[in-house]
Image (spheres, rainbow, N blue to C red):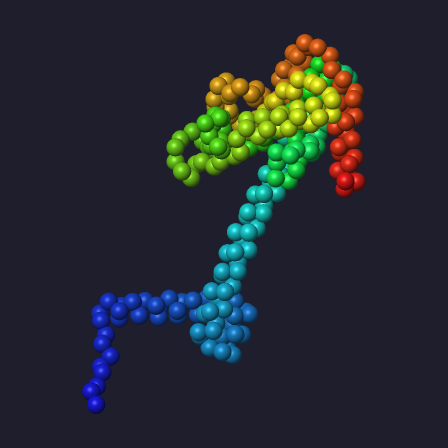
């Protein structure tokens, strides 16, 4: 019978020794963790090392998930703070003829879920305005050429410096269109204007003068734009009641 010898190549030998060294180091670390030290004492090195990798992996996954969740919650908090800031400023600069309605859903056959969520609606004696509030920070490059707007932490082109946000111009135009269609269906004709607001003082808007939708940094500036429309009077009371009725229907689950 022929004998098959086990061939050992120098590079494989070095690799095997390296793996063994890493295993020994991980074993020592594993022993330092009380729970894994017990597993080591009972089952041996292989199981303890495996358990170590499991614990490290679990910590990594939980840490990554926690960071993602924290980022999501932080952004939601900034969004709410931004809407509150704009709302307070609008209330300060607009007189009692104007009614501010926040966080409302307008029925729409053009969307997949059958409605459009709107941050703020201002109903006045001469017009209705839709406000989309964005609370991102950084340098935002606004252009309708982009499906999503680039947000830079600091000026420069490095990839790790850039994130993306929704194209707020397209979003608020869609909200404007859906609200106008709904008002028409209710027999309530009115001019509807679209506005984007970036209330965060740490945000720099690049290219906003090239858009056909006004972008404001404060509720005061938005209020000035809203009050500038005085062509004709509208049925503001009926419009306000109609929109507020949608909120009641939503709270009743209808």
Q: Considering depth in this image, is 131 or 90 the residue closer to the camera?
A: 131
Point 53% across, 19% down: residue = 212
Furthest residue toward top: 231
Point 54% across, 69% down: residue = 34
Asked if 249 appears above or below 50 in the picture, the reply is above
Which quarter shows the C terminus? top right
Quarter assignment of residue 128: top right
Q: Is residue 180 left or right of residue 39?
A: right
Q: Is residue 132 left or right of residue 100?
A: left
How many badges with numbers are in the image? 0
Q: Considering depth in this image, is 116 or 93 the residue closer to the camera?
A: 116
Furthest residue toward left: 2
Point 37% across, 66% down: residue = 22
Asked if 246 appears above or below 64 in the picture, the reply is above
The reply to whether residue 46 is visible in this rendering is yes
Residue 79, given in percent of the width and then of the height, sits at: 62, 34
Residue 232, given in percent of the width and then of the height, sits at: 70, 10
Asked if 228 appears above or below 78 in the picture, the reply is above
The reply to whether residue 220 is visible in this rendering is no
Point 66% across, 26% down: residue = 181
Residue 218, given in percent of the width and then of the height, sits at: 62, 22
Which quarter shows the N terminus? bottom left
Q: Is residue 193 left or right of residue 25?
A: right
Quarter assignment of residue 102: top right
Quarter assignment of residue 115: top right
């Amino acid at each position: 019978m022929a004998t098959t010898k086990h061939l050992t190549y120098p590079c494989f030998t070095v690799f095997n020794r390296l793996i063994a060294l890493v295993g020994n180091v991980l074993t020592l670390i594993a022993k330092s963790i009380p729970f894994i030290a017990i597993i080591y004492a009972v089952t041996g090195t292989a199981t303890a090392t495996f358990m170590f990798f499991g614990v490290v992996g679990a910590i990594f996954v939980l840490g990554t998930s926690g960071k993602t969740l924290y980022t999501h919650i932080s952004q939601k908090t900034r969004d709410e703070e931004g809407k509150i800031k704009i709302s307070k400023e609008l209330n300060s600069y607009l007189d009692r003829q104007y009614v501010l309605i926040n966080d409302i859903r307008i029925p729409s056959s053009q969307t997949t879920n059958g409605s459009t969520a709107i941050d703020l609606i201002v109903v006045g004696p001469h017009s209705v305005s839709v406000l989309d509030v964005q609370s991102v920070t950084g340098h935002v490059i606004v252009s309708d050429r982009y499906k999503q707007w680039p947000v830079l932490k600091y000026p420069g082109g490095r990839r790790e410096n850039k994130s993306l946000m929704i194209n707020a111009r397209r979003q608020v135009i869609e909200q404007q269109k859906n609200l106008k269609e709904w008002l028409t269906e209710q027999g309530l004709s009115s001019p509807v204007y679209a506005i984007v607001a970036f209330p965060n003082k740490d945000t720099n808007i690049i290219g906003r003068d090239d858009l056909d939708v006004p972008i404001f940094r404060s509720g005061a500036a938005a209020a000035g734009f809203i009050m500038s429309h005085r062509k004709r009077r509208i049925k503001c009371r009926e419009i306000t009641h109609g929109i507020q009725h949608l909120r009641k229907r939503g709270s009743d689950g209808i």
